[in-house]
Image (cartoon, grey):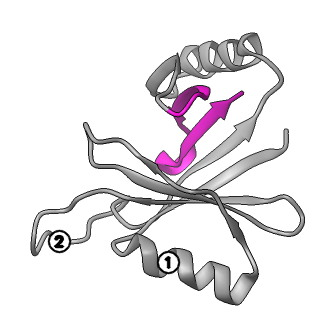
């Protein structure tokens, strides 16, 4: 299965975006903002088609950095259809892996599910 994108959560979204644009010649979308949760993202595309999602969520002033609050957030795998998302999600659940988000259409138009894999790495299965 090809990797769809990798997400990286950062404190300073604009600085991170500028870094990848400057040093790695990434192309950026116009960004996404979910006013309900405060989540802001940019999808950066690199020359070979690989994509990196930069994410920022509001953190309380002085909030400590805890695992999964900065750094790698999830690995996303692009599948062929909604059924191709549903089947492995069900199988992973049956095999004892926690499903953190059942298959659904997201606010930005993806059909996806999220499962915690080995070591708690969040895996996103998406169309």
Vertical relation: 104 (above or below) 27:
above
On-image quarter of the N terminus: top right
Q: Quadrant of residue 12?
A: bottom left
Nearer the viewer's eye, disc 2 or disc 1? 1
Kindly identify the residue that appears in the image at 50 percent across and 50 percent down.
119
Residue identifier under label 2: 64
Residue identifier under label 1: 16
Q: Which mark is residue 39?
A: none
Residue 112 within the segment the image draws in magenta? yes
Element type at mark 1: helix
Read off the magenta span. Answer: 108-127
Question: Where residue 92 sits in the image (x, y, percent)?
Answer: 61, 22
Question: Where residue 107 sits in the image (x, y, percent)?
Answer: 46, 29
Vertical relation: 52 (above or below) 114:
below
In the image, taking residue 126 as reference, residue 61 lies left or right, namely left
Towards the viewer: 113 or 17: 17
Towards the viewer: 23 or 72: 23
């Amino acid at each position: 299965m090809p990797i769809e994108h990798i997400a990286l959560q950062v404190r300073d979204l604009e600085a991170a975006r500028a870094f990848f644009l400057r040093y790695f010649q990434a192309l950026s979308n116009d960004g996404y903002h979910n006013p309900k949760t405060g989540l802001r993202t940019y999808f950066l595309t690199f020359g070979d088609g690989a994509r990196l999602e930069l994410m920022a969520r509001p953190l309380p002033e002085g909030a400590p950095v805890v695992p999964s609050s900065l750094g790698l957030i999830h690995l996303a795998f692009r599948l062929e259809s909604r059924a191709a998302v549903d089947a492995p999600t069900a199988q992973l659940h049956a095999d004892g892996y926690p499903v953190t988000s059942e298959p659904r259409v997201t606010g930005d138009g993806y059909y996806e599910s999220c499962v915690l894999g080995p070591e708690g790495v969040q895996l996103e299965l998406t169309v």
